[in-house]
Image (cartoon, rainbow, N blue to C red):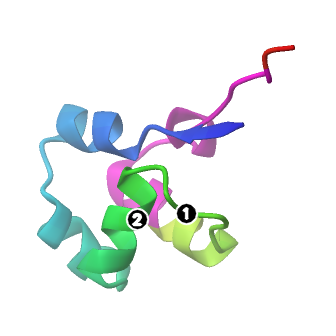
Amino acid sequence: MIRVNLDVVMAMRKIGSGDLADKVDITPANLSILKNNKAKAIRFSTLNAICKELNCQPGDILEFIPDEE
């Protein structure tokens, strides 16, 4: 499983959802889907824009969680 820690990074950078959505040119609804771990995929262009705006690495946002057996 891939966990999206976007909300954590946003809190550390003190940026709100509306501001980030505007700056990376995605809808607030799509940003919410990402923040709430509901997304099935993310475009590299979106990930690039988010990382650029938050001054972070993709690994700061995306975390691999091994399946429990």
Which quadrant would residue 66 be assigned to in this image?
top right
Q: x%, y% of residue 60?
A: 52, 34
- Report the disc number at residue 62: none
Above or below, 51 relative to 33: above
Q: Position of residue 13 (x, y in %)?
A: 21, 40
Q: Is residue 28 above or below residue 55?
A: below
| Camera-nearest residue between 29 and 63 | 29
For label 2, count other residues whose C-alpha is less than 10 Å away and answer few (under 14), some (14-19) or many (20+). Answer: few
In the rendered image, the quadrant that contains the N terminus is top right
Question: In the image, what residue type sits under mark 1?
Answer: Ala
Q: Residue furthest right?
A: 69
Q: Is residue 59 magenta?
A: yes
Is 32 in the magenta?
A: no
Residue type (three-letter) at the residue carrying disc 2? Ile
Kindly state the secondary structure of the residue where label 2 is placed: helix
Rendered position, 53 above or below 64: below
Q: Of the numbered discs in the image, which one, if any, rests on residue 33? A: 2
| Label 1 or label 2, whichever comes before in sequence order | 2
Quarter occupied by residue 28: bottom left
Residues at discs 1 and 2 in contact (Cβ within 8 Å): yes
On screen, residue 65 versus residue 37, left or right, reads right
Q: Residue at x 54, y 73 (%)?
A: 46
Counting labels gives 2
Residue under the image location 40 percent in, 65 percent down: 33
- Please tell me whether mark 1 sits on a helix, a strand or a loop: loop
Reading the image, the residue beneath label 1 is 39
x and y, in percent, of residue 27 in the image: 31, 84
The residues colored magenta run: 50-67
Q: Is residue 20 left or right of residue 54?
A: left
* Farthest front residue in view: 69
| Rendered view: 39 above or below 7 | below
